Amino acid sequence: MQNKIILPLAIIVAGGLIAGALFFSGERQSKTSDGEPSFEKMRPVDKDDYVFGNQNAEITLLEYSDPQCPFCRAFHQTMKAVMAELAESGQVAWVYRHFAILGPDSITEAHASECAAEQGGNEIFWNFMDTMFATKNDRARFPAGTSLETVAQEIGLDIEKFRSCQSSRKFEEKILSLRQDAANAGAQGTPYTLVIKNNEPVGVIPGALPYENVRQMIEQVLAEAN
């Protein structure tokens, strides 16, 4: 992949979206250090990813997210609304990757989602993420009396297996390795979502953009795809 992929990105963000993108990347994203994209080094979407929707969709929204990030919690609801309308067509898929950068609790919560997936695969992973974000407050923290085990119990996991998995930290290396993958994708904070068409990045959603902006961006890419 060459620098030419940046040109479609500029086109997509333009036309009424650029002001929103600049605002929301500054105000609705948990920031980390700056970095330059290196798409050639980024891991392509594959069978090891958690995919909501058609794995062979024309458009893939590849999100890098942190469970402790309040903007990620808000954007998760936006993406659920988008996919409720677009998933059935088979044209759009949503992929979630960990970008756990906000401290030890971020890694612990990301690890818990992996332990859930170990018990039930892709479907249970998404069920766990949906339930975890729904359980948390607006600051993406668990209210008093709730915890990761609350989520595990609510979705019907074997709680003893869940505890054993969490204690093992067996997925921690995977979670940490995805930080570099996110940096290669150009992520400087969370949430950060690449728009991919036919396996090529063509745009980016830089933060928790509102539903209307996300839909407009996707519709433009779909129109170009057709």
Image (cartoon, rainbow, N blue to C red):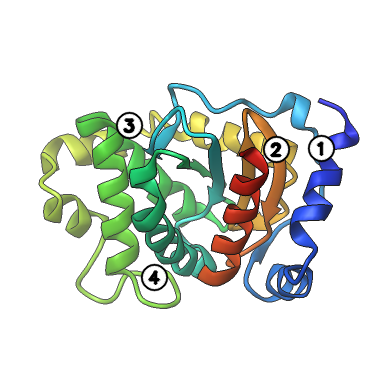
Task: Residue 44: name its quadrant.
Answer: top right
| Residue 219, image x, y percentages | 58, 55
Badge 3, how many Cα within 10 Å: few under 14, some, many 20+? few
Q: What's the residue at 27%, 68% (across, down)? A: 135
Q: Amino acid at mark 4?
A: Arg
Q: CA distance from mark 1 to mark 3?
A: 41 Å
Quadrant occupied by the C terminus: top right
Other residues around mark 2 within 10 Å, as few (<14) / some (14–19) / many (≥20): many
Label 1: element kind: helix
Residue appearing at x 48%, y 33% in the figure: 57
Q: Find residue 168 and name its label.
A: 3
In the displayed orientation, state which residue is furthest to the front.
Answer: 226
Q: CA distance from mark 3 to mark 2?
A: 35 Å
Nearer mark to the viewer, of 1 and 3: 1
Which marked residue is nearer to the observer: mark 4 or mark 1? 1
> What separation in Å lies between label 4 and label 1 (alpha carbons)?
37 Å
Asked whether the residues under the numbered discs 1 and 2 touch, taking CB atoms below 8 Å apart as contact, a structural biologist would say yes
Earlier-in-chain disc, 3 versus 2? 3
Tell me the distance, in whole angstroms, between the alpha carbons under discs 2 and 4: 32 Å
Which residue is identified by label 2? 201
- CA distance separating discs 1 and 2: 7 Å
Residue 194 can be seen in this image: no
Among the two numbered marks 1 and 3 on one chain, the one whose residue lies closer to the N terminus: 1
Residue at the image position 84 percent from the left and 43 percent from the top: 6
Tell me the amino acid under the disc marked 2. Pro
Q: Residues within 10 Å of mark 1 (few under 14, many from 20)?
A: some
Residue 110 % position (x, y): 42, 46
Q: Is residue 70 visible?
A: yes
In the rendered image, which residue does mark 1 sit on? 5
